[in-house]
Structures are given as structure tokens and as C-alpha cells.
């Protein structure tokens, strides 16, 4: 295998065998909320960019997900986006 393929294999192996880290929230810094609706579920990830070892690192603070309700399968893209945002904010507020 070429050096590039070996490197790609090692990166993939590392990603699959190591759990993602979670940052401790810094309430003085802004947050980013990523939302996604896929086939059968809803998921949100709350991220923040913090300085770690003198480098800015964006990392997750929390992940939340749930299965989609049967009635939500008919939602359009904008309705699904609103549902995700409201659902995420309600869950993260608690």
C-alpha cells in the first residue's frame, strides 16, 4: 500500500476505535448548534470553539437524538428545521 493509503487507514482505525471527546462548556464563549434530520431520526450536536494547547479547537459539548414520530414524516424541509431547532432548545434548556 502507498503511504497515503496507510495514513488514511490509520486515521479511519483511530476514528472508529476512539470515542469522541466532550468539551466542558465555557459560558463566556458562543455556542454552535448543528441539527440534522435523517431517514428515521433527529439529532443535534452542541459545539463550542475553545483554545486547547494554544490552538482553537471546535468540539462537541453534547449530543441528543430521538426517533422521528410517524406524523413528522410528512414534514417539509422548513418544518423539519423548525422542529429540530425547537426540540433542541427545549432539551438543552433543561
Image (cartoon, rainbow, N blue to C red):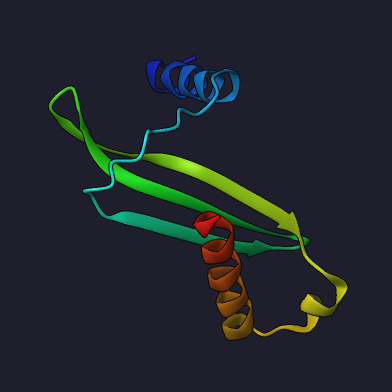
Picture coordinates of residue 11, whole percent (x, y): 46, 22
Residue 25 in which image quadrant: top left
Front one among 55 and 62: 62
Q: Residue furthest left?
A: 54
Q: Residue at x 64, y 65 (%)?
A: 37
Say whether residue 60 is left or right of residue 58.
right
Query: Which quarter shows the C terminus?
Result: bottom right
Picture coordinates of residue 73, whole percent (x, y): 79, 76
Q: Residue at x 67, y 85 (%)?
A: 76
Residue 74 in which image quadrant: bottom right
Say whether residue 41 is left or right of residue 9.
right
Front one among 55 and 86: 86
Q: Is residue 12 above or below residue 63?
A: above
Picture coordinates of residue 55, whole percent (x, y): 16, 31
Q: Is residue 15 above or below residue 72?
A: above
Q: Is residue 46 above or below residue 79?
A: above
Amino acid at each position: 500500500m502507498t503511504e497515503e493509503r496507510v495514513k488514511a487507514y490509520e486515521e479511519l482505525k483511530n476514528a472508529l476505535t476512539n470515542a469522541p471527546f466532550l468539551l466542558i462548556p465555557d459560558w463566556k464563549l458562543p455556542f454552535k448548534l448543528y441539527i440534522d434530520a435523517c431517514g428515521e431520526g433527529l439529532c443535534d450536536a452542541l459545539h463550542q470553539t475553545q483554545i486547547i494547547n494554544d490552538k482553537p479547537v471546535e468540539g462537541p459539548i453534547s449530543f441528543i437524538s430521538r426517533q422521528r414520530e410517524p406524523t413528522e414524516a410528512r414534514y417539509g424541509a422548513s418544518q423539519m428545521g423548525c422542529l429540530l431547532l425547537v426540540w433542541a432548545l427545549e432539551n438543552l434548556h433543561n
